[in-house]
Every structure is written in C-alpha cells, then in structure tokens.
Amino acid sequence: MGSLEGFLAERVVGQEAAAHSVANTIRLCKHRLDPRPARPDGVFLFLGPTGVGKTSMALSIAEAVCGNKDAVIRVDMGEFNNPSSTNRLLGADPGYVGHDSEPALVRGLLTWHAGVLLLDEFEKAHHEVQQLFLAAFDEGRLRDAKGRSHSLSNFTVIATSNAGGYSGREVGFGSGAARGPSVEGKIPKELLSFFSAELLSRFDEVVFFQPLVERHLLDIFHSQLLRGLNDRLAEDSGVFVQVREELVSKVLAQADCSRFGARELQRVFQRLVTQPVLSLLGETGGTGELDGVTVLSLL
C-alpha cells in the first residue's frame, strides 16, 4: 500500500496530484484510521474532461487494492435520469414488473465483496437517484428493493463527472487535487447546479484531473500504446514494431486531445500505426516497412 501513489501515477499518466490525493485517503481507510470504519474505503468525486484518466484511475485502484482490475462494478448513471428509474438501479418493489430480476448494481454487489463501485457520469442521474447514495456514502450500506442490505465497507466508491466543464483548474477547493468541500466551506456554484450540498459533503475528496499536455501524450504513445501493441505482437506473432519520429509527431498533431483526451490519441494511433502493422503482417507475414512503421522479427 505504501507505493500506491506510484502504482496509480504510472498507469494514469499526467495525474500525479490526483494519484497522491486518492492514495492518501485509501491508505487511511485501509489502516482503519477512519473514525467511521463501516464507511467505504474512500468516496471520491472525480472531476475533469473526458479522456484524461478518471476511469483508468478507478480500474487501477481495483488492480492495486484487490489484485484484479475486473473487481469493478460500473454503473452508467446517465441511464437513471428520471425518478422512476430507481427501480432499475436497486430493483422493483414487490408486486411490480421486474421484481424477480436483479439490476446490474445489485448483481455486482452480490458477486463482488470488495473492489471499486464506479458511478460514471454521476451528474446525469436524476436528483432523487443521486440522493439514494447519501446513506451509502455515509454509512457504507445500500439497501435494494428486496430489503437486502449490501455492505460497501470494502469498496472504494468513485463518482465521475465533467460537470461544470472543469478542466483541472482551481475552483473553490484550492489546488488541483484538493480536499473535499467541507474543508474550507467553499462549494463551487457550478457544482451546486448538479449536486446538492448535502451530497457533496459526503465525498472524502473532490479530485480534479488535469488536461493532458504534449509530454503526457508522448508518454502515453510510447509507454502504453506502442508498448501494449508490441507486447501483443510478441506473444501472437513473434515480431515487434518501430515507429519513425516523424510518424509520432504526425499522430500527436492529428489527435484532437483537447476535446477527447487520450481516447482520441488511441483512435489516431490505430489508424496510423496499427493499421499499417496489420497490412504488413498480411502482406509479408511479419517484416517490412510501411508509412513510417517498421515490423521486425524477434527471432
């Protein structure tokens, strides 16, 4: 647990402050220093533009804490944008259609007894749906429509959002990854348009994710995209890929990462790097050069 910051920062490029903030809170909870031990192992609101690593941080937390990045219950909160949708979140009341089926959230809680509960795009959920999580954040228990109580004491709860158009700037809480709203009593007006003050006060940390700059994108290109491609090729085909610097610059130039972050970089990488690799593998059986991409045999 001592190297949790490093683990998270290595896997989520450009978000060192966020990794430090998250790791501190999780460490406190895991060592049972939290005065309310029944609560989740950290309740976070991740704020920032799309594609900067909010979801990747959640998956990395599951991998670091549970040893399994699949130990994530992921709920798309945009599907619960009206009051009646609560029955699709926690189940229908007895006598109503759907009472016998288990919603995804409940199935996840029945399957996993520790891990990460990821509430994606939390701001899109209806206010009444958001309020269902007040007790869960505060007491570490969530009750479904069948009356069963599910413990969240071994879960880290993460709500993600780009509410208010935040892009890592300082807003109300101090620096980029600051303590939650209760520290200075400052709640940004933009957030109050999406979440109640009562709900915001339940988060241990409101963590701001920074926009990615060119050095971060270059790091992602080499350490994640290219390395990942080479790891798969080495295992499947016994080859590896080299990429000319001109092509690296071209990929970064064509990726509009200001809007879509690393996701856009990945799309351009697939088009300008992965597709030529596939062409070479199909035409030559493994080696050759095409459009700035060289495929070489490991043998």
Image: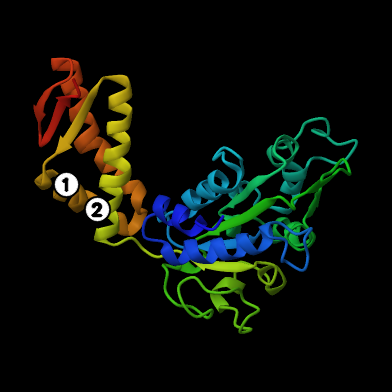
Instruction: Find out whether the residues at labels 1 and 2 contact each other: C-beta distance under 8 Å.
Output: yes
Q: Nearer the viewer, residue 231 or 131?
A: 231
Query: Disc 2 marks which amino acid?
Result: Leu
Q: Secondary structure at mark 2?
A: helix
User: Is the residue marked by circle 2 packed among few (<14), some (14-19), or many (20+) residues within 10 Å?
Assistant: some
- Eyeballing the image, is 95 above or below 151? above
Rendered location of residue 172, percent (x, y): 52, 81
Rendered location of residue 176, percent (x, y): 45, 72
Mark identifier at residue 218: 2
User: Is the residue marked by circle 1 packed among few (<14), some (14-19), or many (20+) residues within 10 Å?
Assistant: some
Q: Is residue 124 left or right of residue 211?
A: right
Q: CA distance from mark 1 to mark 2?
A: 8 Å
Rendered location of residue 43, percent (x, y): 65, 61
Query: Disc 1 marks which amino acid?
Result: Val
Residue at 28 percent of width and 25 percent of height: 234
What residue does disc 1 label? 248
**Residue 116 appears in the picture as rendered:** yes
Rendered location of residue 21, percent (x, y): 53, 66
Splitting the image into 4 quarters, where does residue 95 fall? top right
Residue at 54 percent of width and 79 percent of height: 173
Quarter of the picture containing the N terminus is: bottom right
- Eyeballing the image, is 181 above or below 243? below
Q: Nearer the viewer, residue 120 or 3?
A: 3
Splitting the image into 4 quarters, where does residue 14 fall? bottom left
Q: Is residue 285 left or right of residue 58?
A: left
